[in-house]
Amino acid sequence: MQITNKINFRNIQGDVFGGLTAAVIALPMALAFGIASGAGASAGLWGAVLVGFFAALFGGTPTLISEPTGPMTVVMTAVIANSIAASPENGMAMAFTVVMMAGLFQILFGFLKLGKYVTMMPYTVISGFMTGIGLILIILQTAPFLGQASPKGGVIGTIQNIPDLLSNINPLETILAVVTVVILYIVPSKYKRIVPPQLLALILCTVASLVFFGDANIRRIGEIPTGLPALQIPTFEPSQLRTMVFNALVLGMLGCIDALLTSVVADSLTRTEHDSNKELIGQGLGNLFSGLFGGIAGAGATMGTVVNIQTGATTALSGITRALVLFVVVVWAAPLTASIPLAVLAGIALKVGINIMDWGFLKRVHKISWKATAIVYGVIALTVFVDLMVAVGVGVFIANILTIDKLSELRSKSVKIISTADDEIPLTDEETQILDLAEGRVLYFHLSGPMIFGVAKAIDREHNAIANYDVLIVNLSEVPILGVTSSLALENAIKEAIDNDHEVIVVGATGKVRNRLEKLGIAGLIPEYHWMTDRLLALQEGLAIVREKQTQNYNEDLIISNE
């Protein structure tokens, strides 16, 4: 694995210009997310610098832009609120420690090569999850949008206090927030590459607030400290360690999902393929250093990444350029942001929440199936009102159960057992003739395709359907995978046949399938000469056994009659 990301100077103009453009977009977003999280504008800016730099340098997606995002900010807000509530003195330090721990989790995921599994979730769950996060972000911006401080209690607290928020609305700040959202919507697409609408809204509304409402009581960002940030020593309290680990795991997992989904978008635009495990390590290093220097958590940002690529970037030099530009702004130009109204940032964050919601799928999901609809809206409700990880866990569990049920139903149709010719199992004329001659005494058990655990019931059902036979032939030549549960069901069928003095012949069991049966001890129950590779030979052997038994039974009956 290459240690650093792909960087070359063959496209220096495109990479530098892409990085500059991404930095311009990142500035208002970082300020908005920093304020929205509760950590402050400075934490948002340093998160954008540090996560962006280390993820670009050590990640696995050359054109990915990483910074604080809407989903990460939602979780970060809850982490900060819970940490401060648990320990007012050390709460913020504990929250930054959670960011560091989340980074360590991401690095661990990368080293364990879990990248390819992170985004293996049904789209119904992803859609509901992202829509729920968008709703949370919108709800949390309600108070600042109306010109007031956010009430305690997060989403539930905000919803409960809506009557009070509406009765104490600050008209001037609400007007600025509304104008901000309007600007974000009305800027024509052809101008968005030239002037990002977020920056345009930030500048215009800030200037308007100073010119027209300079003396009014409008809440603003205030002075942001210049220079390098103070080192945040990892801090925790024994009573809160379990909660911090859980929060770090949630933050780390969400960062992995957010980043790798954006990496897939980058791949589709650049026609390349990212290294998911390397990307998780890069994201983890970014969040580790962000927390260490007082920045909020971040992940791959779709908007910044798309603009970066469309502007001409092809290597990680673009992400590094963007981080360096923001670094200069934070270190030397931070005082210029002091007059930005908080309502303007609330408008920008609210628009991000609206964009995160999966409107396209929500409009169509009810046409697909009621099950998909139930999963999507169930995940949305759990995300907003319960917990993000609970929402993902429950959504994935239900979606997988439904998928397994469908696969099991489909695979069950590939389990067939016959004692006479059957059109659903293609047999040659000679094989059909053998079954006819056996007169139902040869039971042919045909399995095909992967035998997942849901097929076990079909194996039991088919085997129990016919009881009177002399020979059981089990054909596994078309089975590439034999699951544990299906193996045990097959073992029961074979043992039952042997216990009832029936002969068993196994056809086509090779490789992993044969190995699985041997580990279960089935190989010791069947003579080696009854492990065959050809179906016709197995049927011929079965017919010979039937005739031998018929002859033996005839002789026994003859002896009894003579006596």
Image: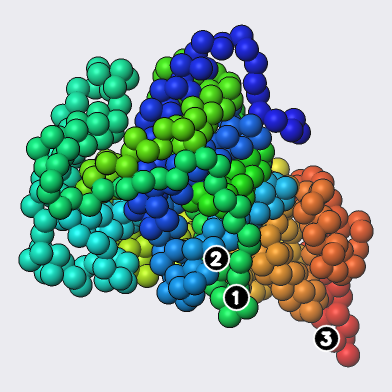
Q: Quadrant of residue 85?
A: bottom left
- Determine the residue located farthest toward the front in the rendered image: 215
* 532 left or right of 179 in image: right
Residue positioned 52% across, 40% down in the render: 227
Indicate the position of residue 540 as horizontal and vertical percent values: 79, 51
Residue that badge 1 annotates: 237
Tell me: 132 left or right of 322. Answer: left
Q: Give the x, y percent position of residue 417.
A: 61, 60
Distance CA(mark 1)–CA(mark 2): 8 Å
Q: Secondary structure at mark 2?
A: helix
At label 3, counting other C-alpha atoms closer than 10 Å, the crowd grade (few under 14, some 14-19, many 20 or more) is: few
Disc 2 and disc 3: Cα gap in Å? 93 Å
Mark toward the start of the polypeptide (1 vs 3): 1
Q: Which residue is mark 2?
A: 94
Quadrant of the image for the C terminus?
A: bottom right
Task: Give residue 351's mark.
Answer: none
Residue 378 visible from this viewpoint: no
Marking on residue 561: 3
Given residues 212 and 531, the one toward you in this image is 212
Q: Residue at x 63, y 62 (%)?
A: 234
- Observer able to see residue 232: yes
Name the one closer to the observer, 515 or 367: 367
- Which quarter of the figure has residue 275? top right
Q: Nearer the viewer, residue 131 or 242?
A: 242
Element under label 3? helix
